[in-house]
Amino acid sequence: MTLFYLLDIIGTMAFATSGALTAMSKKLDLFGVLIVAVVTAVGGGTLRDVMIGSTPVCWRGDLNYVYAITIAFVLAVVFRGRFDKYRTSLLLFDTIGFGVFTLIGLAKGLAIGLHPVICVALGMITACFGGVIRDILCNDIPVIFQREIYATICLLGGAVFFALRYFNLPTDVLYLVTSLVMIAVRLLAIRYKWSLPSLPG
């Protein structure tokens, strides 16, 4: 199992957990919680694969994604009482998931020879749009459209990735450092309430 594949599974579990916790905070029934967990975990990757013509989409040909989502769903339901605050837990899982999924989108674009700008866009779609679908289903304004610098950090991660790639670092080191930078910036943004200015109405 490569580091890239392991990160993919970790990101899938993180986003599935985020989706399940959001659904439970909205008092959805068990089936609703499962559906939101699934679309949060694979929504961005599915959209990415459809856009680049990579079919069947990533999770259809590998049952490990199904197992990862199922495990995350069960753990979220069983241990939901252990989470002190839903919001804190959601931010933590979102941070892990979007850091990992940005790298996966970047790598997918590079694998088929796309321009770096398009690769960064694919990374952002992979990382953000599962959460967009989750928030829409749960009747919330998606985080990506609010003042938190969510998608902006994906763009920063893309810039860091290609800057480090210029120095021919080992692939595993490149993935690890980029993901850690993104996670660190996201946590700092939450801690110090960094945000982009909103336009006046």
Image: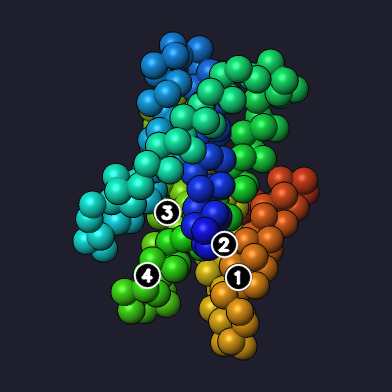
- Quarter of the image for residue 126 reads bottom left
Inspect the image, locate mark 4, and give the three-letter code of the amino acid beneath it.
Gly
Location of mark 1 (residue): 172
Q: How far apart are marks 4 and 1 (CA)?
A: 17 Å
Instruction: Report crowding for label 3: few under 14, some 14 to 19, many 20 or more residues within 10 A (C-alpha).
Output: many
- Nearer-N-terminus badge (3/1): 3
**Left or right: 24 with respect to 58?**
right
Q: Which colour scheme is used?
A: rainbow
Please tell me whether mark 2 sits on a helix, a strand or a loop.
helix
**Left or right: 76 with respect to 125?**
right
Location of mark 3 (residue): 126
Instruction: Report crowding for label 1: few under 14, some 14 to 19, many 20 or more residues within 10 A (C-alpha).
Output: few
**Residue at figure coordinates x 77%, y 46% from the top left:** 191
- The image shows residue 102 at horizontal and vertical percentages of 50, 59
Give the total of numbered labels. Answer: 4
- Look at discs 3 and 1 and give the one toward the viewer: 1
- Nearer-N-terminus badge (1/2): 2
Against 161, is 36 above or below? Answer: above
Please tell me whether mark 4 sits on a helix, a strand or a loop.
helix
- Nearer-N-terminus badge (2/4): 2
Inspect the image, locate mark 2, and give the three-letter code of the amino acid beneath it.
Leu
Inspect the image, locate mark 3, and give the three-letter code of the amino acid beneath it.
Thr
Decide: marks 3, 1 in contact (CB < 8 A)? Answer: no
**Residue at figure coordinates x 70%, y 32% from the top left:** 88
Inspect the image, locate mark 1, and give the three-letter code of the amino acid beneath it.
Asp
Location of mark 4 (residue): 109
Against 104, is 20 above or below? Answer: above
